[in-house]
């Protein structure tokens, strides 16, 4: 797919700020939209810890949250390319990894500080050039969609907007890959390429192109044909996908530790464990057995004190 029907979006070709404020677009008065643009009090900043890593998050609040959610819906309507696996219904980090099945050479690269790189000029170019909005509409949308110079981490809208703002670079990567018979996928800031031509030399071409578009990069690596690869958190070996070893061990340990917890702690832990096991089951169906056991245990705990029966350890399933 080489083009996107952005002209189907209500945002495309907007020449009037008053039209932007109408109910079928953003649905707030122009005065209110102008007041929200760049208003620091419309955000909540905090630190989120995910997998042991701290991340500064900025979430929109109140009317601005409603505006961002509406923009998410409007951007979500625009068709996405086959290479994009993030923010697309029916696609995920697992389908991203699955696109590279087979004993193929593979190269990977991460965009450094991706959301921070989607700054005011990039957002402005998206609305002004790709969406063909007038200068006043572009200015207002850019101020509504950015905070402290870039898209906020913590808004539903940011992932879609980051893709479209980075689309000129990603389309160049798609064309480079097609010319050399390489499969290209993108999952947020993770770029993966596989095929006979996915060599260290190809990775260097990718890096040059990313640098040309003024993005930073890190974690570049190459796998030879036949090697097991880790792509967006999934182990790819030949025609098989597998769960990361540390992820599998954590699930086993959580199940083994369950009966050491108090009833209240079990209730709190089960939701987290079910989510983790469901993620593993999306890669390896064997984990569905463990997930069903955990769901059944949660149901028992909701209605009565837990019985002495244990959830069997994963390696006995």
Image (spheres, rainbow, N blue to C red):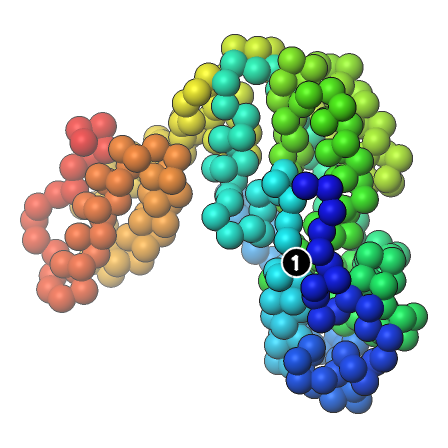
**Nearest the camera: 306 or 292?**
292
The image shows residue 202, relative to residue 308, as above or below, that is: above
**Nearest the camera: 75 or 145?**
75
Residue at image x 48%, y 48%? 90
> Residue 193, located in which quarter of the rendered image?
top right
Mark 1, residue position:
78
Q: Relative to 184, is 30 on the left or the right?
A: right
> Residue 183, located in which quarter of the rendered image?
top right
> Residue 170, located in which quarter of the rendered image?
top right
Residue at image x 49%, y 31%? 98
Residue at image x 85%, y 27%? 208
The image shows residue 92, relative to residue 176, as above or below, that is: below
Q: Quadrant of the N terminus?
A: top right
Q: Relative to 282, is 190 on the left or the right?
A: right
Q: Relative to 231, is 25 on the left or the right?
A: right
**Nearest the camera: 260 or 33?**
33
Q: Position of residue 36 (x, y in %)?
A: 75, 80
- Asked if residue 287 can be seen in this view, the reply is yes
Q: Relative to 34, is 4 on the left or the right?
A: left
Q: Position of residue 87 (x, y in %)?
A: 58, 52
Q: Position of residue 226 (x, y in %)?
A: 52, 10
Q: Quadrant of the C terminus?
A: top left
Q: Position of residue 108 (x, y in %)?
A: 66, 26
Residue at the left extreme, as displayed: 308
Pointer 1: residues within 10 angstroms few (<14), some, or many (20+)? some
- Asked if residue 146 can be seen in this view, the reply is no
């Amino acid at each position: 797919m080489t083009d996107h029907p952005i002209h189907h979006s209500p945002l495309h070709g907007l020449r009037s700020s008053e039209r932007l404020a109408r109910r079928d677009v953003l649905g707030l008065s122009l005065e209110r939209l102008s007041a929200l643009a760049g208003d620091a009090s419309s955000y909540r900043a905090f630190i989120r810890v995910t997998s042991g890593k701290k991340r500064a998050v900025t979430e929109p609040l109140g009317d601005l949250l409603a505006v961002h959610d509406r923009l998410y819906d409007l951007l979500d309507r625009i068709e996405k390319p086959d290479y994009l696996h993030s923010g697309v219904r029916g696609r995920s980090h697992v389908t991203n990894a699955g696109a590279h099945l087979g004993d193929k050479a593979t190269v990977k690269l991460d965009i450094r500080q991706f959301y921070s790189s989607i700054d005011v000029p990039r957002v402005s170019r998206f609305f002004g050039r790709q969406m063909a909005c007038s200068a006043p509409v572009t200015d207002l949308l850019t101020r509504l969609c950015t905070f402290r110079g870039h898209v906020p981490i913590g808004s539903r809208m940011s992932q879609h907007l980051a893709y479209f703002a980075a689309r000129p670079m990603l389309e160049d990567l798609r064309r480079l890959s097609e010319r050399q018979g390489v499969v290209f996928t993108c999952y947020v800031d993770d770029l993966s390429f596989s095929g006979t031509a996915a060599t260290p030399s190809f990775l260097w071409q990718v890096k040059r192109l990313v640098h040309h578009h003024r993005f930073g990069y890190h974690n570049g690596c190459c796998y030879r044909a036949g090697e097991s690869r880790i792509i967006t958190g999934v182990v790819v070996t030949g025609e098989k996908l597998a769960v990361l070893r540390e992820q599998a061990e954590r699930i086993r340990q959580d199940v083994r530790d369950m009966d050491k917890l108090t009833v209240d702690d079990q209730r709190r832990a089960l939701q987290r464990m079910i989510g983790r096991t469901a993620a593993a089951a999306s890669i390896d169906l064997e984990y569905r057995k463990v997930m069903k056991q955990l769901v059944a245990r949660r149901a028992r705990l909701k209605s009565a004190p837990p019985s002495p029966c244990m959830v069997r350890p994963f390696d006995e399933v």
